[in-house]
Image (cartoon, grey):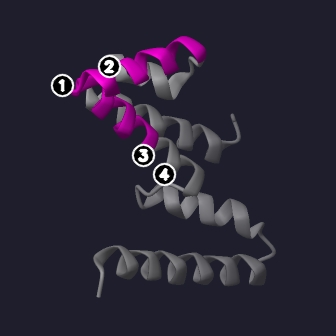
Amino acid sequence: MNPFVSQATKIRATTNTVAKVSIIHQHNARESVKAVLLGLGRLNVPHLIMLRKVNFYRHLFTSNNQILSCALHSFMLRRCDVVVNSVFSHKFSAVQTVYDKFAAYVDGFN
């Protein structure tokens, strides 16, 4: 079995369990699932996509391919956000920014 599919199945089972427990205890299921994901060190889908973008932009930035590098620079001139700006920081900092944004989202600051 594909490790990603196995991991996705485990996450789905966990979120379903949390949703059922939160319904029994009259909690908002969405809030409970976000908190469980944060506690497990996992990200929700929008933040997973953001993490993939960070890794992709960093790969383009460090690439020796001039076409890819020029494409990134022209893209950066048109759009400037936290994800794109992360190419200028260390990889750990860029990834940590995504996790911090998710933590703020879970805490309701987003």
SS assignment for the magenta stretch, majority = helix
The residue pinned by badge 3 equals 52
The answer to whether marks 4 and 3 mark residues whose Cβ atoms lie closer than 8 Å is yes
Quick check: is 64 in the magenta stretch?
yes
Q: Residues within 10 Å of mark 4 (few under 14, many from 20)?
A: some
Secondary structure of residue under mark 4: helix
At horizontal 45% and vertical 82% (from top left) the residue drawn is 9
Q: Which residues are magenta?
A: 53-78
Residue 73 seen in the current view: yes
Q: Secondary structure at mark 2?
A: loop
Q: Which of the image's four quarters has the C terminus?
A: top right
Q: How far apart in space, not on screen, are marks 3 and 2 (Cα)? A: 16 Å
Whole-percent x and y of residue 5? 39, 79
Q: Position of residue 33 (x, y in %)?
A: 62, 66
Asked if residue 66 lies left or right of residue 53, the reply is left
Question: Which badge, 4 or 2, is on the more N-terminal residue?
Answer: 4
**Amino acid type at image mark 4:** Leu
Q: CA distance from mark 4 to mark 1?
A: 26 Å
Q: How many marks?
A: 4
On the image, the x and y values in percent for residue 41 come to 40, 55
Residue occupied by mark 2: 89
Q: Is residue 110 magenta?
A: no
Label 3 sits on what residue type? Arg
Residue of label 4: 48
The amino acid type found where label 2 is placed reads: Ser
